[in-house]
Amino acid sequence: MPRMPQWLETAVFYEIYPQSFQDTDGDGVGDLQGIIRRLDYVKDLGCTALWLNPCFASPFLDAGYDVSDYLQIAPRYGTNGDAKRLFEEAHRRGLRVLLDLVPGHTSWEHPWFKASMQAEKNEYTDRYIWTDCIWEEPAGCASLRGISPRDGSCAVNFFTHQPALNYGFLHPEKPWQQPMDGPGPLATREAMRDVMRFWLDLGCDGFRVDMAGSLVKGDPEGKGTVALWRDFRAFLDREYPDAALVSEWGEPDKSLQGGFHMDFLLPWGPTHYNDLFRCASPFFAGKGDASVFVEKYWASYEKTEKKGLICIPSGNHDMDRLARFIQGDSLKIAFAFLLSMPGAPFIYYGDEIGMRYVEGLVSVEGGYGRTGSRSPMQWDESENAGFSSAPKEKLYIPQDPSPDRPTAAAQCGDPASLRSEIRRQIAVRKTHPALQSRGEIRFVSDGAPGTPLSYERTAEGERVLVALNPADEARFCPLTGNVRKTLYQLGEAPAAEGGRLRLAPRSAAWLLLGESQ
Ligand code: NOJ
């Protein structure tokens, strides 16, 4: 594992979807000036770092994950100068900024792709993965074909308009497949290094890396992609040793080996993350089962040599809003979990006020079912909830129409609000090393039906027992030490009964322990 920048150890992230955060020029779409204007809000919540979804030039067929110029802020968000100012203003407040690096594919409008479509050989001929005959498709992925004079089909990485950049094949078998150290793949690597250099020089602190595990093809075990990321990390260690890297990969044993500092826990695949938050009976709604999640998490955790550097998000721009499944105190208990787990927590903008999934929307910019989780932030009671001065119908995505929609202003002024609760939780996390990114975890009760979710976090000689009971009835878990102090409590206080802890219905507690019993 690479050396971790100190700030990452205590980081609490806030994810900003730029188009929906704050509009300052009245076009109905958020912008970088808007983010600058709201930095104090993010800081006041207690977050220490931002992750911005892609804000680069793009035709926005996938909300910016289809980049057409890696080195240019999309005009609708502002200029590169605004980005520089954003980094400076964030740093002035002690906040770090991760940009979203999309290294696996570009937009089909990227000049590299346009040049690679040409029949004549040129500098970009091998920047993407093309077969050498239109009638052959690259195995294992969809392709773009019949769109250019070039005779071949081009592999795509996600949507059809996102041609895959060429980092080579682990074991090339066909003449058109280049090895990882072939000239095309090496040139792509260098181009991506230049992209990183550009933004790090301008002042960003690192990157969240989109689909980080997807780069080398014909590589089901990820060996080539791990090697590729080690090479990127070596470059960063030479030139930008403090640059942080967080991967969207979902296999921390691979990503951490590749030099990432942390990996996201993904809502799909084998994680069972959604058993907790998003299913017919989520654990945090009080009736579900957390035990399979715990088993899978533990397996991943052990593979990271107990480093546990797995970021658990409250949600993100790809998932249903948390509040679609969980409400009221249950949401507070869910955050008592998110903010007491190892790895840096990520709060998706608006989740801190319980913003709802907006039902029934027509897809915007390739959002499809994700669109309802991307609606503009609800700041206050003014027009368009303070997001924009544009006419309502010009907003990027329609806002939650409910008269009782939550707003940041109302919640900031209410000590009983979700935001105030999260603010308290973050403040406690920040002052206890055991609760931070690198503290070890040991599960005490796995949240199987009839049991609470409970775990011990330890670091620097400190032990904290976290006990969470979202159910409507009292639950019991083993008490693993003498309680020296209650660091945080929601609902009725837990009570020691023999060697057990009785947790009141819908309650949460973080308890500082003394020596083991
Ligand atoms: C993952 C991103 O989070 C998602 O929004 C995007 O559509 C795909 N990667 C493709 O880049």
Image (cartoon, rainbow, N blue to C red):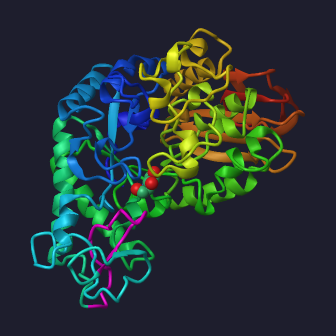
Position of residue 162 relative to residue 429, above or below, is: below
Choose between 401 and 116: the one closer to the eye.
401
Q: Residue at x 73, y 31 (%)?
A: 327
Q: Is 422 displayed left or right of 384 in the figure?
A: right
Is 332 within the magenta? no
**Quarter holding residue 54:** top left
Percent of width and height locating residue 230: 29, 62
Q: For ligand 1, which image quadrant applies?
A: bottom left
Is 170 within the magenta? yes
**Quarter holding residue 404:** top right
Q: Is residue 237 visible in the rendered structure shown here?
A: no
Q: Residue furthest top?
A: 413
Percent of width and height locating residue 405: 64, 23
Q: Is 447 displayed left or right of 97 in the figure?
A: right
Q: Residue at x 24, y 76 (%)?
A: 180
Q: Residue at x 39, y 54 (%)?
A: 210
Q: How many marks?
A: 0
Magenta residue span: 153-174
Percent of width and height locating residue 271: 62, 58
Q: Is residue 219 visible in the rendered structure shown here?
A: yes
